Image (cartoon, coloured by chain):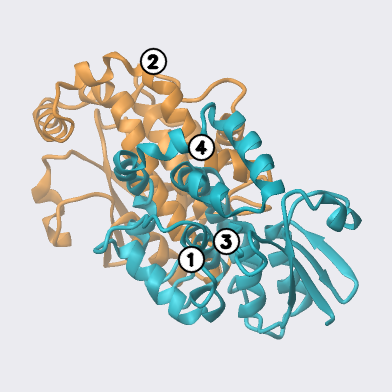
Chain colours: A cyan, B orange
Amino acid sequence: MVRTLYDLAADPELRFSPYCWRARLALAHKDLPVETVPWRFTDTDAIAFSGQGLVPVLVDEGTTVTDSWSIALYLEDRYPDRPSLFGGAGAVAPTRFVNAWADTVLNPGIVRLIAADIVRILHDHDKAYFRQTREARFGQPLEELCADRDSRLPAFRQTLEPLRALLGAQSWLGGAEPTYADFIVLGSFQWARCASPFELLAADDPVRAWRERLLDRCEIARDARRAA
Amino acid sequence: MVRTLYDLAADPELRFSPYCWRARLALAHKDLPVETVPWRFTDTDAIAFSGQGLVPVLVDEGTTVTDSWSIALYLEDRYPDRPSLFGGAGAVAPTRFVNAWADTVLNPGIVRLIAADIVRILHDHDKAYFRQTREARFGQPLEELCADRDSRLPAFRQTLEPLRALLGAQSWLGGAEPTYADFIVLGSFQWARCASPFELLAADDPVRAWRERLLDRCEIARDARRAA
C-alpha cells in the first residue's frame, strides 16, 4: 500500500479520534485508498519517525504529514484533480474558523461528557495514560466528571447554536455539498458515536438530522465499529 | 446619491448596530460611496418600503436589499470587478459559519455586558422600546444585568477562544488579507466600541491586536463617533 494512516485505536478495530476521523473522511472524499495502522497513545516509538508524538500521521508515497489540518491541505494540494475538500482556495481560511471552533468549543465540550466511556474502551497501557493526563486536566476522576453529564447536556447543546443557525440557512457547512468543514464537525460527533453510547443530540435537533444525512454519505463513518 | 443605507443611530452621528457596521464595512471594502440615513428602532415607517422593520436596509440604484448577509452577497454579485468580499465563491458557505457564530455567541455575549450603556445613548422614543424588549428578553432591568459585568467578563472572553486559535494560525479570518469574515466580527466589536466605554478585551489579547490592526485598515470604523 502506498498510503498509510496511523489511527488512534482502542481495540484494533475501534477507531475513535476526532482528528483521525477528519483525516479518514478527507481521504475518503478524495477517494484515496489508505491502510490504517491501529495506534495507541503510548505507542510513541511507532510514530517517532514523524518527529512528534500525535496521530493522525499520514505517509503518502513516502511523504510524511502530521496534524489533521496539514493533512487536509496536503491532500488538496497533492490531489487537485480529485473532488475538492474545500471548494476553492478562498474557502480554506474561513474553514479554519470551523476547525478552531471544533478544537476549542466542540471537542472540549464532548470530552467532558464521554471521558469515562473512553477510558473504559482503551487498552490497559493507554487507560493509565489517558486517566492520568485527563484527570490532571479536569481536576477530578473521570467517572466523577461524567456522573452529572445529563444535567450538563443542555449547556453542551447550547454551544451548538452556531451550527443550528447555519443549518437553518444551508444544507451543509460547505453550502450545497459537504466539504471538509462538514468532515471536521462530523469527526467530533463520530468520536462520541464510536467511543460512547451516550447520545449527545436530541431527536429533533437539526444538528442530528445533519449528522445522519452526512453519515449516509460517509460509509466509512456510518459503518465504523462502535463501543458496545 | 445612487446608494443609501438606513443605519441605526443614537444621536444622528453615533452609529452602533453590529449588523449595520457589517454593511458599511462591506461597502467600504468595495469602495462604494453611500449616503447613510440615521434611523431609530421606532422609525418603522421610514423603512416600510423594504417590507420589513429592521436595518440595515440598502437601496442601491433602485434595488432594495435587507439583512446584512444578503447585502454582502448582493454587493459581491453586483460588483464583481471590485475587491472581493469573500475571496471566491467557495468561501461564502464557510464564512456563513463565522456569521452564525457572531449572531449566536458573540453578539448575545456582548449585549449582556453593554445593554445598560446602549439604553443611555438612545433617543427617548428608542429608550423605551429598547428597555422593554431587552428587559423582557433578559428577565431583569438592564442596569441590574450589567452591574456585575466585571465578574462575567472572563466567561465572555473565554467564548473568544475560537478566534484566538484561528489568529494563532493566520493573520486574518480571511487568511492573508481581511475578508467579510473579518468585517462580521469587527462589526460586533465596533458596536461595543461605539456604544460603550467598557473595554471587552484584555490588553494582551491577540483578538485585541487583530481588532486594532483591522481598525487601522477600516478608517470609517476607526474614526467613527463613539459614546462619551
Q: Tell me the residue at 20%/27% (across/down).
A: B122
The answer to whether the residue labelled 2 contacts the one labelled 3, judged by CB atoms less than 8 Å apart, is no
Viewer-closest of B49 and A45:
A45
Chain for numbered disc 1: B
Per the model, the C-alpha gap separating discs 2 and 3 is 40 Å
- Decide which of tag 2 and tag 3 comes sooner along the chain: 3
Give the number of the mark in front: 3 or 4. Answer: 4
Find the distance from the CA under tag 4 to the CA under tag 2.
Answer: 32 Å
**Residue A163: x and y, percent?**
39, 57
Is disc 3 on the same chain as disc 2? yes
**Quadrant that contains the N terminus of chain B:** bottom left
**Amino acid type for the residue under numbered disc 1:** Val
Q: Residue at x 59, y 27 (%)?
A: B205
Kind of element beneath mark 4: helix
- Is residue B4 found left or right of A33 in the rendered image? left
Distance Cα–Cα, label 3 vs label 4: 51 Å
Position in image of residue B136 (x %, y %): 11, 33
Point out the tag, 3 or 1, that comes first from the N-terminus.
3
Give the chain of mark 3: B
Q: Please, what is the three-letter code of the amino acid marked with disc 2?
A: Asp
Task: Describe residue A110's horizontal placement relative to residue A14 as left or right.
Answer: left
Whether A167 is drawn above or below B182: the answer is: below
Instruction: Tell me the tag on residue B150.
Output: 2
Examine the image and state in which quarter residue A202 appears.
Answer: bottom left
In space, the residues marked 4 and 1 are separated at their CA atoms by: 40 Å
Q: Nearer the viewer, residue B223 or A200?
A: A200
- Mark 4 is surrounded, within 10 Å at the Cα level, by few (under 14), some (14 to 19) or many (20 or more) other residues, namely many
Residue B28: give x, y in percent of width and height: 48, 50
The residue labelled by disc 3 is B83
| In front: label 2 or label 3 | 2
Question: Which residue position holds label 4?
Answer: A142
